[in-house]
Amino acid sequence: MRSTNIKKKFNKFSVLLNVILIAIMAIGVLFFLPKEQKSEIKTSINIESIEKVNEVVFLNAGVNEIITETKTTQVFGFDVPFSRKTALVILNYTAKFGIKSSVKVEQIGEKEYKVIVPKFEVIGVELSKDNPKLVTNQLSSDKQAEYLDKFKSEIKESAINYYKTLFSSMDSEAKVTVEFSE
């Protein structure tokens, strides 16, 4: 009797063990099956301002500027040895050059016009995502004037092409001269 009792317990244990193994295998299979993911994207847009501008951009200049700043600790007017620190910053931005006020157009003959372009200005600066505050500090009025002088011929060439194209689109026989206020 004892042997049948042990066999029954062994059979029950064997069945239970098989059920557990099948359950573990089923869970393992479910774990490794490809899963579908649900994704939800929410976007919030806030327009902070809208401004009408009378600006014409004649030239965009991509600028890459390298700034090196060195600091040395001093005690009683003397440099402390091994206290020199150097920072190297690379700035990338786009400067936009053009005009913010209207041009004057004079008719000087039949189908002949003179366009007087006002003084060129820095219209704006599109900052790179890195170091925007540093870029803003670097673009002082003196630096802007330097860039305007450096790129003046390219800006003028672009302005001449712009106004000649504009007038020729209205009248293909129109003659246009462009004059610049400096």
Image: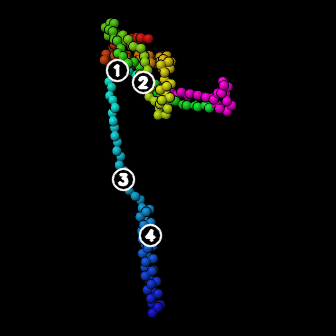
Between 2 and 59, the one nearer to me in the picture? 2
**Image quadrant occupied by the N terminus:** bottom left
Stretch of the chain drawn in magenta: 59-84
Image side of residue 109 versus residue 15, left or right? left
Residue at point 38%, 54% (across, down)? 37
Q: Residue furthest front?
A: 76
Q: Could you tell me how far apart the alpha carbons at marks 1 and 3 are, in whole angstroms?
A: 47 Å
Secondary structure, magenta segment, majority class: strand
Q: Residues within 10 Å of mark 3 (few under 14, many from 20)?
A: few
Residue carrying label 2: 124
Q: Residue at x 48, y 17 (%)?
A: 145
Instruction: Say which element carries label 1.
Output: loop
Is residue 51 covered in magenta?
Answer: no
Q: Which residue is mark 4?
A: 24
Distance from disc 3 to disc 4, alpha carbons, whole Å, reads: 27 Å
Q: Nearer the viewer, residue 47 or 35?
A: 47
Q: Earlier in the sequence, mark 2 or mark 4?
A: 4
- The answer to whether residue 147 is visible is no
User: What distance separates the C-alpha of mark 2 from that of mark 4?
Assistant: 65 Å
Judged from the image, the secondary structure of the residue bearing numbered disc 4 is: helix
Amino acid type at mark 3: Lys
SS of the residue under disc 3:
loop
Residue 150: image location, x then y, percent: 51, 18
The quadrant in which residue 26 appears is bottom left
**Which circle marks residue 54 in the picture?**
1
Within 10 Å of disc 4 (Cα), the crowding (few <14, some 14-19, many 20+) is few
